[in-house]
Amino acid sequence: MIAFIALTFKEGIRQLSDFFDGHLPAYFYIWCGGIFLGVLFQLIREKKDGLLKESYLKRALLEILFFFGGWVLAVKIVQFFTKVIDDGVASPSELIFYQLGLTLLTLFYLTLFMVYSIQKSSLSKDNQQMLSFAAGFIPAYLAFRASELVIFKEWELSQTYILVLSAVLGLAGLGIRLAMNMSDKEDKPSTENAAEEKVVSSNMI
């Protein structure tokens, strides 16, 4: 376990070094810039809805840390399933893993955005959970398939590999929705307590 953590840390440092040293193709940096703009839009949206409790600067710094940590984790995930699934990636390389990892992370952000929108809908909780899984699975499958056919033709991904990565994002969407449910339950008692204290104070006056 310690050896695995040490290896992950070492590979993560190399991955980030490749990024900050400018060794990756230019489209990686444009791609990351697009993701950061999307995250900024989501922060503004959360602030407008009263869900952003910390400052923009603090949250932005946390999002930057999450982005690079998430990218390292996403690369490890695609590498793991490459080892588990035979011929998942026909000609695996470091660059392809970086591309797949960043695609996976981009789709995670998209899933997060869509689940947030689903949460604000008037659908029942059961329907919201089903849609949250679909919000992760369906766009991921279409994106991986389209990217392989149009953009990154060198990927040559197997059908099973794409389905598994899509299922990972589907489960991520469902997990995000369940986490939101738990957060709502925790916030509800505190809101009710605040309302009760307000009523008591009014009666005393």
Image: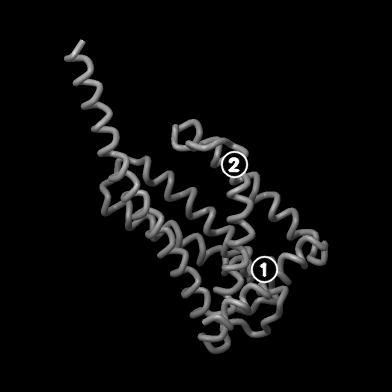
Looking at the rendered structure, the kind of residue marked 2 is Lys
Residue situated furthest bottom in the rendering: 86
Can you give x and y, in whole percent of width and height, for residue 115 in the image? 42, 50
| Residue beneath the point at 43% across and 46% down | 116
Looking at the rendered structure, the kind of residue marked 1 is Gln
| Residue beneath the point at 18% across and 14% down | 204
Q: Nearer the viewer, mark 1 or mark 2?
A: 2
Can you give x and y, in whole percent of width and height, for residue 92 in the image? 67, 82
SS at circle 1: helix
Alpha carbon separation for disc pair 1 and 2: 28 Å
- Going from N to C along the chain, the mark reached first, 1 or 2, is 2
17 versus 51 height, above or below: below
State the image quarter where residue 88 is shown. bottom right
Residue situated furthest right in the rendering: 22
State the image quarter where residue 106 is shown. bottom right
Residues packed near mark 2 inside 10 Å, few (<14), some (14 to 19) or many (20 plus): few
State the image quarter where residue 7 is shown. bottom right
Residues packed near mark 1 inside 10 Å, few (<14), some (14 to 19) or many (20 plus): some
* Mark 2 lies on residue: 58
| In front of the other: 121 or 178 | 178
Tell me the number on the disc at residue 99: 1
